[in-house]
Amino acid sequence: MASVGEPLVKIRDLHYSRDKNHIFKGVDVDIARGGVTAVMGPSGTGKTTLLKLIGGQLYPDSGTIHIDGQDVHKMKTSDLYRLRMRMGMLFQSGALLTDISVFENVAYPLREHTPLPESMIRKLVLLKLEAVGLRGARDLMPSELSGGMARRVALARAIALDPGMIMYDEPFTGQDPISMGVLVKLIRSLNDASRLTSIVVSHDVQETAGIADYIYLISDGKVVDQGVPEKMMDSRSEWSRQFMKGLPDGPAAFHYRAPELEQDLMG
Amino acid sequence: MRNSRHIEILVGAFMAAGLVALFFLAMQVSNLGSTSTGDGYRVTARFDNIGSLKVRSPVTMAGVRVGRVSAIDYDSTTYEAVVSLHIEGRFDQIPEDSFAKIFTAGLLGEQYIGLDPGGSESYLTEGGELALTQSALVLEEIIGQFLFSKAQEGVKDE
Amino acid sequence: MLDPLARLGRAGIDTLEQIGRGHLLLLGILSGFADLARRPRLLIAQLYAVGVLSLLIVAVSGTFVGMVLSLQGYYILSQFGAEQTLGVMVAASLVRELGPVVAALLFAGRAGSALTAEIGLMAATEQLSGLEMMAVNPVKRILAPRFLAGFISMPLLAAIFSALGVVGGYFVGVGLLGVDDGAFWSQMQAKIDLQGDVRNGVIKSLVFGFVCTWIALFQGYYAVPTAEGVSRATTRTVVHSSLAVLGLDFILTALMFGD
Ligand SMILES: Nc1ncnc2c1ncn2[C@@H]1O[C@H](COP(=O)(O)OP(=O)(O)OP(=O)(O)O)[C@@H](O)[C@H]1O
Ligand SMILES: [Mg+2]
């Protein structure tokens, strides 16, 4: 395990609910410095919510999230913004600005936060776009991109400022096998080359297990299992084994909470 | 940003058009040329009755507007109305002994102050006073006087 | 079933919450003006979207309103032999009331609804969230320039509306109906006051621009982030802005011309 000293992100006893929906009921997670930590779990368990909590966009009901020793939710706004400059986030939807081109989207954080001259910005943007294989698409507008392309542009934007930590929300969804392979390698090499800390949220067990140093499995508001990938595959917990191998039968439920199908159909 | 020059030109044109419109409203539609805020001087006149004279009513000489009424006060010791007139700076040769009368434009029109020039060699200046005044003609009073004099004639005839 | 009293209380608290949110948002927007000085391009882009794109409808409406006023006014005034005062009537109605009010209503329909839809969609597609995570404050970077653009554009649009209305009224009154050219302008100039009429009209349109843009941005920013939510918010922008303009116009008129 790549964990060196204190973890970068420390989540303790996190509780969060939306309306009457208890999404987290006491979650403890450590994100090791310089490693790739994966957070996995069934759809709708709150993985995206967890990332937004870490980014300080949502506030927990109770519990704390510390990044580099500082409590994210007790910071002054200006400090939070300074922290976010060192954080990249790849949104599940991409979240590109739709009124400016691909090039301008990637250039946006550079223009906002650095005094770099135009020629320098151009070089950096082209390098980042090259890394995700979309240098040729720089003049397209976001509406002209496919879902998978948009996500890759968003990734280029997330790494534009060379952040110290990146959160990837479903980076592999909608990618063909080739770009998937490139992305897997990219995430891993970004991490190793610049001692980046990465959090990957994904359903793709194979790919995630391939690059993650450590995996958390979240279900029903709790961490149900954690460990290094190899151990998770044949975990003692039947639930983890089922999830990691994608078996339809087992203790993990595929369905959202509902009454028995027969009852529902009979009305 | 694409076409940014094009957009800048259009925005510039819009701002210019808006300012031209404001300028047009100020110069052509309203009375900026003769407004009471410009340079000029203030004189007062006392009337027994000002009728329906209002602040901003015109002040004219020979039918030409030379200023406006800028304030109307009441002097409680002499029971008179004290009217302040703002006269434009370019009309600086109005004899001191000019005669101020309150006229009505048409039968039911609004009232204004007309100045009849006197013969004095010295002219009105800031803070001066028009001593000679004639009050507004109040329609009811004229009718009343007319009826009264008719009644008097009737008494004599008998 | 909810007790009616409790429901009333809840509605009251919700309203207070909305008012509070609206003012906090306004505070955030105003605090973004300092940044704007360093990025004039953001403002120019919005002046284009808010001002230039509203220009055509405002100009056309202004001209026609002036023409119709002149036509209607002529028939009424000529019955009293007072068609000489046609210029006064046209200009006074435009400068005092119709210019600021109708231009603001058109502005709410043309620019306000577009602002709400744009901001609402940016929220729905996580663009605002994305900006926040890039350490860019969307209230300052996205809302503030739009607000300032609306505030600047509104009085200019209203002035263009009034000016073209007077010109339209002139063509109908003098050109078509034969009112005396000199009387049309001189009567107008004698009665329309720069301070009392023109300046008050500009003050009105500044207030309307402020309120309409504020409502549009508020509705967009707090729209439910779905297609239906944004569509409802857009409708609310037009309805709330129109009501606010008419209500404020009454209050302002009473204050300004109430003597
Ligand atoms: N804006 C919202 N309002 C109310 N509830 C929400 C909202 N966003 C998410 N939720 C609820 O929060 C829960 C967690 O959502 P979240 O998006 O974090 O799931 P997720 O684990 O990322 O799922 P997926 O893998 O499908 O992306 C869901 O049950 C959802 O119903
Ligand atoms: Mg998600």
Image (cartoon, rainbow, N blue to C red):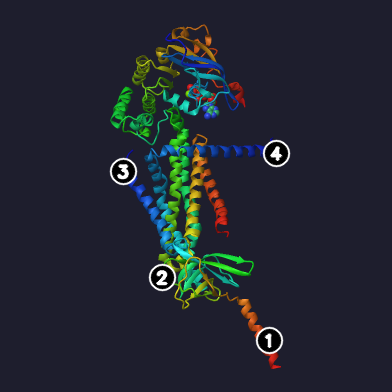
Label 1 secondary element: helix
Q: Is residue C77 above or below residue C193?
A: below
What residue is shown with label 4?
C5
Query: Does label 1 lie on the same chain as label 3?
Result: yes
- Same chain check for tags 4 and 1: no
Inspect the image, locate mark 3, and give the three-letter code of the amino acid beneath it.
Answer: Arg
Q: Please name the residue shown 43% across and 64% down the image.
A: C169
Instruction: Identify the image quadrant of residue A163.
Output: top left
Seen as rendered, the residue at the extreme bottom is B158
Q: Which residue is mark 2?
A: C182
Q: Residue at x 50, y 75 (%)?
A: B97
Q: Which residue is mark 3?
A: B5
Above/below status of C38 relative to B28: above
**Label 3 secondary element:** helix
Q: Secondary structure at mark 2?
A: helix
Foreground of the two, B6 or A79: A79
What chain does badge 3 belong to?
Answer: B
**In the rendered image of this protein, does residue C164 appear above or below residue C148?**
below
Chain under callout 2: C
Mark 4: which amino acid? Leu
Would residue B18 appear left or right of A10 to someone viewing this image? left
Q: Find disc 1 in the rendering and name its residue.
A: B151
- Asked if badges 1 and 2 are on one and the same chain, I answer no
- What whole-number distance in Å separates the C-alpha atoms at marks 4 and 2? 65 Å
